[in-house]
Amino acid sequence: MTASLSLRARLFGPVNQLLLQPVLASPAAVMRPKLERIAGLITHVPRGTRIEPITLAGRPAEKLTPKGATSGQVLYYLHGGAYLGGSPRTHRGMLAHVAKASGATVIAIDYRLAPEHPYPAALDDAVAGWKALLADGLAPSKLVIGGDSAGGNLALVTAIALRDAGLPLPAGLVLLSPWTDMSSSGRSMGTRAERDRLLTVRGIDRAAREFANGLPLADPRLSPLFANLKGLPKMLIQVGDDEVLLDDSLRLADAARKAGVDVTLEHRMGLWHVWQVMAGWMPEADQAVAAIGDFVRRLLR
């Protein structure tokens, strides 16, 4: 399964397991600074990318504008980190590469995190950020919402909340290894537990309970896999075969298609959770980012 992977992928996989897996299983107070330091070591920003700190709906955010960006086209991005950690800074390298590949400006909001701010704080911030983008005059047809892992969960629940409130929806959703089932009912939680290089079942369960604010973990507000998906925009889902959240993506794709949603599913063998963060360092990450760029360009042209 790994024989077809690049040499760099075969090297980075074990390194991720050694360095990152223990960090992601740590309590939030330990995880956050370590993630920031590790991200600083691997961040690779394409030349010509302009990075600006901004404020969006009262929250800190980063705006990444690639050279030759198409005016008015934006990927509104919600970072991963189990709802406990992560920031626009930890995802800066990947997002800069996505900006270059898509020609769109990327705006990543620094939403509030659990356990200090459990559900629905992150959702409130994400929806407020969306409203602020529209208030700035951006057209929803020129906007895409994206996210990875917990950020993929947040992108989905944000789109559902917008639909239910009768607010304009984005042109599409980009979901990278999205966490769609906080109840951990997918078979891959067992079948991929030994192969996952980043996540542990115990760490996922702890993060879910710290975020849930007393709600049942299978509640659709936490686990959008079980929500009504009808009327959502086109989706691009990317997932690696070697991750415990594999079934969160496969079942989402199936449920969304049954609800009439146009879904593009990219299921990559031998790869791990959100391998796209290695953009600029690993061919498989660059290929995934190129596919994201193509998806966004087609939607927003």
Image (spheres, rainbow, N blue to C red):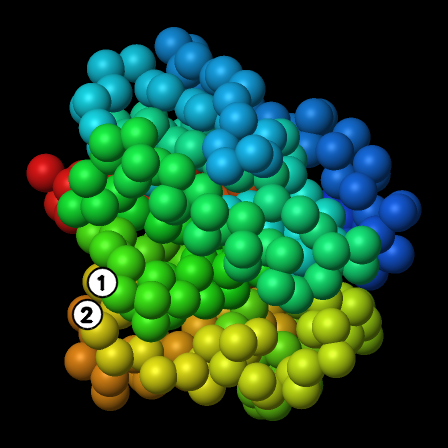
Q: At x 83% / y 36%, what residue is drawn?
A: 33
Disc assigned to residue 276 = none
Q: At x 63% / y 57%, what residue is drawn?
A: 121
Q: At x 37% / y 45%, what residue is drawn?
A: 131
Give the left or right position of residue 227, taking residue 124 as reference.
left
Rate crowding at label 1 as few (under 14), some (14 to 19) or many (20 or more) other CA atoms within 10 Å: many
The residue that label 2 is drawn on is: 262
Q: At x 43% / y 23%, what residue is drawn?
A: 64
Q: Whole-percent x and y of residue 191?
A: 63, 84
User: What amino acid type should be assigned to the residue bearing mark 1?
Assistant: Lys
Quarter holding residue 232? bottom left
Kindly give the residue lying farthest to the top in the view shown: 48
Q: Whole-percent x and y of residue 53?
A: 54, 19
Give the left or right position of residue 189, taking residue 51 as reference.
right
117 or 239, nearer to the observer:
117
Query: Up-down: is 199 above or below 20?
Result: below
Mark 1 residue element: strand
Query: Up-down: is 38 above or below 28?
Result: above
Q: Whole-percent x and y of residue 152?
A: 48, 59
Tell me which label, 2 or 1, sits earlier in the chain. 1
Q: Answer yes or no: do the residues labelled 2 and 1 have beta carbons within 8 Å?
A: yes
Asked if residue 214 shows in the view, the reply is yes
Asked if residue 272 shows in the view, the reply is no
Q: How many marks?
A: 2
284 or 141, nearer to the observer:
141
User: Mark 2 and mark 1: span between their CA atoms?
Assistant: 5 Å
User: What amino acid type should be assigned to the residue bearing mark 2?
Assistant: Asp
290 or 56, nearer to the observer:
56
The residue that label 1 is drawn on is: 234
Mark 2 residue element: loop
